[in-house]
Amino acid sequence: MTSSFLDATGLGLGARRRSIGIYLATALIAGALIALQITVMRIFSVGSWAHFGSLVISLAMLGFGLVSAVMCIADGWFKTHWRLMSSLSLFLFGPLTVACNLLVQQFPFNAIFLISDPVQKWRLALNMALYLVPFLSGALFLGVVFQQAQTIFNRVYFADLVGSGIGGLMLLASMYVLAPQDLMVMPLVMWLAGALFWFDALGARRHMLGMVVLIGASLAAHLVLPQLFPIAKIAISDYKGVSYARKFPDSQRVLMHQSPFGLLEVYSSSYLHFAPGLSDNAGFNLPKMPENAYLGLYQDSEGPGGIIRQLPADETAYYQYLPMVYPYLLKPKADAFVVQFGGGLSTALALASGSQTVTVAEGDRGVLDVFRNNKILRDFTGDILNRPNVKVIDYDGRLYLAGVRNRFDVVDLSLADSAGLSSPGGFAIVEKFAYTREAMGHYMRALKPDGLLSVTIWNKEEPPKSVLKLYATMVAAAHEVSGPDIARHFFVVSSYLSTTTVLYKRDGFSNEETALLRKHNGLLSFDEIYSPGFEYNDPDQAKLLEDYRNQIFGSGAPAPDGLDGSSEPAPDVAIDTGLPSTRLARLAWQAHVKGTWPAIARDYVFDTRLLTNAHPYFAAYIKTADLTNVLDRIEILQDEWGYLLIWVTLGFACIAAFSLVLLPVVFGWRTIFVRYPGKMQTVVYFACLGLGYIMVEVSLIAHFVMALGSATISASVLITGMLLFSGIGSLVSERILPQARRLMPVLFVALAAILIAYATGLDWVLNAIGSQDYATRLLCCFALILPPAFLMGFPMPVAMTSLGQLGKEQMFIWAWGINGCFSVIGAALVPVISTSFGLDSVLTVSGLAYLLAGVTFFAVLRPVLTAKPHQA
Amino acid sequence: MNRRHFLHMSSGLVTAALTGTILPDTAQAAVSTPWTPQMKPPMGNGEEFIQWAQKNRGESAEYLRKRWERYQAVVSNKDVLDERNKTAFLMAPREHFVLPRNLPRAYEHAFLDIGYGVTISGPHIVSRMTTSIDVQPGDKILEIGTGSGYQSAYLSYLTDQVFTIEIIQPLAERTRGIYDQLIGEGYSEFKAIQSRHADGYYGWEEAGPFDKIIVTCGIDHIPPPLLKQLKVGGIMVIPVGPPGAQRVLKVVKEEGSDGVVRATRSDIYGGRIVPFVPFTKLEGGTIKGTHNQ
């Protein structure tokens, strides 16, 4: 006969060695699951599209929900067969993980054909279904442990949280030595360790041997099978940048560098050509075009970014035809600051333009490492980062300028994060803190009194979107720095479907300076959008705005004016009078200067609100009111797929989560749960916890990028800090169990107050922290995480342990599932709320969720009814 | 799917599996009437067109029907404007340039995968780009990015001098193979297409200068060598943006009154705002406005 779990494991009897083994097993298995999540996310990032990797978190949580629903319905069976189920789940994880991953890689999908090719949808579904399988195995193990340890839930929950935090950290550390395709090794090893502790605690020595053999075989299959057969460990999409580079006949990989910052590869090939924003006139006027001037830089297979070689003197005229050259026309001997190094083009241009000093920032340590230390790159770039007049800042330029007292003649932000901005197919919903109103304010204040800020971004959208956001953002920052009259502070040019450059001069442009810039602009044949004294009136403003709206939401049938019945294409009547996008840009600047932009923005087809630290997105252009109108035209809004996907994800998350929550309701609302009073409030309680926790975690990751500069570091700090401190909270919660009725409401109010305070003041604090040295920033970030995370560790174990102690057994395991399901919804809600209402709002909503949890908490403590069901 | 279609697809897939290439096998009997610029397919009635093309070109009624339906859509959207471009659309057998697995969707508006990370553009954008450069008989045209081969095939019905460059060698070889196979079957018009594998950035200097250039691959700037190989007064078009929502950049090389040569950028329709087009809906071969109506 099967012994009871607590007896068998020693958890109930206090057999210390065995109980420690169980806690370690729980921690390691939880750690392995987190490590697997991050591994799969990395595989998606490198192989196809990172956004689908984020769905993996939802998959894992859904796995918990599905398992909990089944366990809730078959509670008794699982209790009896806990040994079998735990062993089965442990044995299956390794083979399932390896098999599913290899299978997924044989059936990759192409994101760009998701709408047009029905096969791709099935492939995506297959990918997701296969990756769900190993998480089911992990969820089954944790479910069994939680179910069995109901009365001491807070302790195993502590192990679960701390193990998850440390597991994530270990996976990130392993990224220094393991390539993305082999990261799978880490969760397998952690899983093996966890399983060995488990079987040791149960005294099942033969199972330990079996486990070693199974994981060993799984590892061997992962490492050897792809070499024996022509199958890929990561199927890199043909549509990823690096796939093209690899097809060039003379392409050579110059270097590969892996770290938690990503997989960095550099290729050389005579087929690689870059010249972002190069004037068309360069081809006619340059005596010599530099040949083989670039190497291709690829990050997580995306790119290329151009790494420019050191040009000899007879080739540097080339720089004169790039849009980044404008500020140096007025400041030939500048103290220049380059906000983001990237591939080094802006830095090389600043040096070639005669700058006395160039201070260059780069937050990606991997990039700095290879440029400083790789001999091939050092030779190619003329050792650009080690030159005596070049100073390197190894974190975000935005943060450096926010805190430094130095002042610069030129601050340059040119095509930073260019992969995201240049490629509308990048689809990214990514926080772009370098482009926010606050960041622009830092750049402007870091200028000498006659200094220049130069910002260049891609202008490849029609109807225009990003550029209008940039204009609005820079104008708002200028108002804060220079006051209400900004008419003389800007000079703006653009090239149709290429780039736009905005120059801001702190003390305003003189007439001579304006004339000089105009003259050079004539050489480049770029469109002048705004300059001091530039007047523009568009009599057809209303029609222009209406036409843009019709372009997206009109019937699509009407022919362009003048084309009906014509036997030949219409002549180019509008070239000299301005293209619509040029007219709109000119209109926008006139309106910005005169303060009439809001009225025009209201009538424009897309949302062009400025970027702020709370709303740092070059995305989410579709106005919320238009969301339902785009459903039949998704194909023409591919650059918004990332945004639309977050709504779709939310929809699926809600359907999946509610289905799983409803499953036990359908099967047991009037039978299993009939003796549990306050069951609806209990459901709401755990739903609020699920929503609140994940929303705080995900939104803080985005917030902390402001201070830490890197999404990877921010995620590491948050995952580790949140889980560790919550784990401690969970452990400490045992002490307040007897006074839970009195103390928990206070805790909920305190927690909500902290979160709402963070919503209003965290950005200010993070900005202040951002200019400190990195160790101090890390410490401060952990200190900021501590108060909410510690308190957030209490509600779940207090309620779960109470359910266990009250004998609400089915409710116990179901509550765990509800928590998981609403975590999925919460994770999907974060981008929806933050793009619609701002990042700050997410914390406020989380605070309110915890307040609601506080209100419903007392239902959890209501004892099980002993009366007959019909009398309840 | 009817039996013949199934057999065509199957044989294409088997061929691909055996030879490592993906040559769609959709041709029927050899073309009975060779192409001449004077050839005019019926444009007023779908059944007449299908019968005419079956008789003169030996093509499949199934694909001819789909071609006719798409033809109505591109005409409705003003993607083709004159008789010559309309003829080119009706003559160009798009089904020979898609992968076997995409044959049923050869005439859908969408772009399709052709392997190597490359797509065949949708029929609307191909028509619109070709119309916009106003190809005249005898014009020397350079295409950068051969890809599937459909664009150059389309051009071969408008001029007898088409030069096309593909950067991906196996794709260049595969497409050349398709042209040669089709020429062997009687599509003599494709003899006008000269193709080669090279880096299109540098153009085709020995064949230039060109009257028109069509670039069908993405780049962050217009290659200066191409601008040099474009005749003064010549037109270059380049699609910008994601497939399905591309704007087509038109560059005209002009000599000003001051004698200075400049490149002027505009949209293919001179900068007017043109509604996007992928929503033309076909129901039973009839245009039903747009999907959003």
Image (tube, coloured by chain):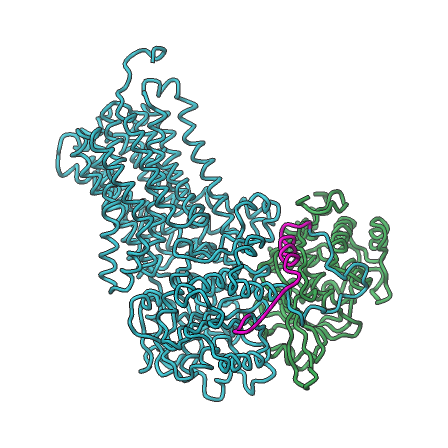
The structure residue drawn at horizontal position 60% and vertical position 68%, both measured from the top left corner, is A536
For chain A, the rendered hue is cyan
Q: Position of residue A156 (x, y in %)?
A: 23, 37
Residue closest to the eye, A701 or B34: A701
**Magenta segment, which residues?**
A530-555
B237 displayed left or right of A67: right
| Nearer to the camera, A725 or A223 | A725
Q: Is residue B173 visible?
A: no
Q: How many marks?
A: 0
Is A572 placed above or below B227 here?
Answer: above
- Between A279 and A597, which is closer to the camera in this rendering? A597
Q: Quadrant of the C terminus of chain A?
A: top left
When the figure is inspected, residue B208 is found, relative to residue B6, above or below; the finding is: below
Tell me, yes or no, whether the highlighted magenta stretch contains residue A542: yes
**Quarter holding the N terminus of chain A?**
top left
Quick check: can you spot residue A428?
yes
> Is residue A221 or residue A310 the one in the foreground?
A310
Q: Is residue B75 magenta?
A: no
Q: How far across and how far down the image is residue A255, in percent? A: 39, 70
Locate residue A141, reporting x and y percent: 31, 36
Q: Colour of chain B?
A: green
| Residue depicted at x 32% and y 18% | A675
Residue A780 horizontal/vertical position (percent): 23, 56
